Amino acid sequence: MRMSDWNKIKEKQSDLHEELEAEDLVHHLYEYHVFTEDDKERIMHETTRKDKARRLLDILQTKELQEDDVYAVFLSQLRRTQPHLADMLKSPGRWHKAAATESSKGRQVDHIRNLDIDQLCEFLTPLLKKNNITDDVLTQMKVQKITGRVFLKLDKTDMKELFPELPFGERKTIILERDEYIQCGKPQTESHEDATEEHSLREREYARKFDTKTGCTEKYKKGKILENLQTRPGNKIDPTHHCIALVGLDVDSALETVGWETMKFASSCMNDRTNGTVHFGVYDGSDDSHSHGEVLGVTLERKDCEDTIAESIQKCFPPDQHDVASACIHPAKYVDVIDNKECCGYVLEIDIEPKACLVKDQAYFIQDQYMKPREKGSRQKLFRLKLGAPSEEGIDIAQFMKIKSTLDEQRKEAEEKYAAKTAQGMNLLQQLRMFLCDGDTQMGDIYPVLVISPLDKSLSLKDIHNRFSFIADFEWKCIFDFDPTGHSGGIYEYLEKKQKMVFKVMLTDDFDQSEREHPQTKSRDEKLNEDMESSHLKPWIFCNGYEPMEKQDLGVLEWKRKRSEGFKEAVRYFYHCLPRDRAMIVYLLVSKEYDVMLEAAEEINQKFQNQWMMLAETDSVAAHWKDQLYIRQVEDKTSLKN
């Protein structure tokens, strides 16, 4: 490796030793011939993650490649596994506490400027909490419609007019926090490790799982980073991901790009016998204008995209391979992109699945449908994956023809292993029985409590039946429902109308001492106990709105002011009613619209420590929930991994 490149790594060496996940990276570097088998074994024999990272960098320093730049290969593979570390190497000084360069200051200014009202409030929440400043500030910002762009221009006069009740010191602290973030990329009082990780968690999004439909809960937020785009080379089942931004193209050029790039990527996956997904409307990280994996979105007509792909298959692949290509290239998926809660486009995603029974014993050449007949060069091209992207450079076609039968065997073996692993999986009902009943149908010594997030409004009762009918199979001790429309189109209505179940409907107000007409007549617990004992029905508690009683759903701040005390009393009540250490809280997460429920989770998890589990509609929803619990310091890393 060139000394100048090694110096870039050396400057960040301590950070890399602390954060680098060598086990993921070493396989990529071995696949691309940076490391030998002996190198890989030496690294993997180390016993700790930190030692593995140190050994990887020591060996990397000695490496050279004939055709490729070692540092460029290292950086590209690091971007696939840990993009924030690649950014750190690409932009020296970005993470230092010293004053940032003008360009990095510009990035922090741009970050704040692009925040909408809700995103700005989310950005400010931990800063206010750290400085013990009331979150009434956020309410006032929402009332006055303060966006990031406006926030950047606020001075001490504006702050006094905006927050007349706030002490001078707290108004000044908010300005100082803003200026320190612009200067250093984070508040100076925050530790480097916590700031880096929390920023990463707040900014990331999770890509749709391979070969799954885009359900109503599957949405990306514009500007977020798709985090799970890395894969391990040699793994033919976990998909490789290829991102294309489609920035600055007119409609015709964008459609041409969709057609040709899909064919290149598809034929590469088919030749390598590996699954893959191409994402149009996601940045590839080719320069510093956006981060790798950043969601941008596209606005092309969906039918035009589908027609272009179908036409490209016919024009690019030879006639005898049309059927195979059509079977391997799955129908287009569209993931809506949300900006300030409004849909502003979508990410076009196309899964490629070259099953062994389809692609066996063939090489897949394609023709460039846009090449003019008289242009020099062969119209027939063979692509394979290189650094995660389709490439025709340096491919020895004769050698490939010799090894394609070996690739067929590897694909078949991978499919068999995956099928065996999948067969061992359990559905939600079986999982719950295993957790709650030791596989039996009786609850035994476990007392389950169900907590339901808001549902997507597009779900029908039939959808609810297909996904959540298992709820009726368990004897819940109580249900906390954060879906304000649960009585009309939600899980409550489904259980009531379709399953003919009856519950005792309650509100958080029923547990709030301040809401009682004559609190002095009887204690809260006495009244509640009488109320509960007089009914054999299980309590169904609507925690954020119930229209039949004219209780509307509230945003986070209003809920904390008006309903959180009642909710806390409800949690405390059941905490004392249920046998100690025998409750199990089951969070049912069916969308990411659970901001109020996240506030409530702090009280639940504090009372019922290590007594909770979650069932999520998608991996993305689950990962986002865990990220938010960690950011809010409700749970630590260890508990979230269990």
Image (spheres, grey):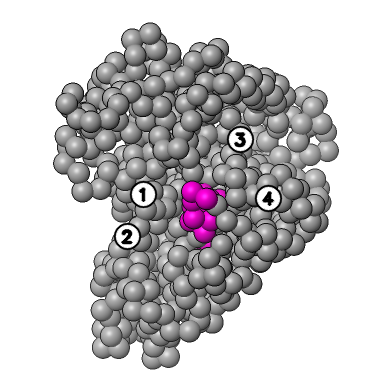
Q: Residues within 10 Å of mark 1 (few under 14, many from 20)?
A: many
- Residue 521's quadrant in the figure? bottom right
Query: Does residue 13 appear anywhere in the picture?
Result: yes
Residue at the spot of label 4: 23
**Which numbered tag is attached to residue 319?**
none
Looking at the image, tell me whether mark 4 or mark 3 is earlier in sequence order. Answer: 4
Tell me if label 1 and label 4 are in contact, CB under 8 Å.
no
Looking at the image, tell me whether mark 4 or mark 2 is earlier in sequence order. Answer: 4
**Which numbered tag is attached to residue 283?**
1
Q: Secondary structure at mark 4?
A: helix
Q: Residue at left 66%, top 66%? A: 17
Residue at the spot of label 3: 234
Tell me if label 2 and label 3 are in contact, CB under 8 Å.
no
Tell me if label 2 and label 1 are in contact, CB under 8 Å.
yes
In the visual, does 15 lie left or right of 157? Answer: right
Q: Residue at left 62%, top 22%? A: 406
**Numbered range of the magenta stretch:** 66-85
Q: In x, y percent, where is residue 379?
A: 28, 25
Q: Give the Cα separation between the discs numbered 3 and 1.
A: 24 Å
Q: Give the Cα separation between the discs numbered 4 and 3.
A: 14 Å
Q: Secondary structure at mark 1?
A: loop
Q: Residue at left 74%, top 48%? A: 38
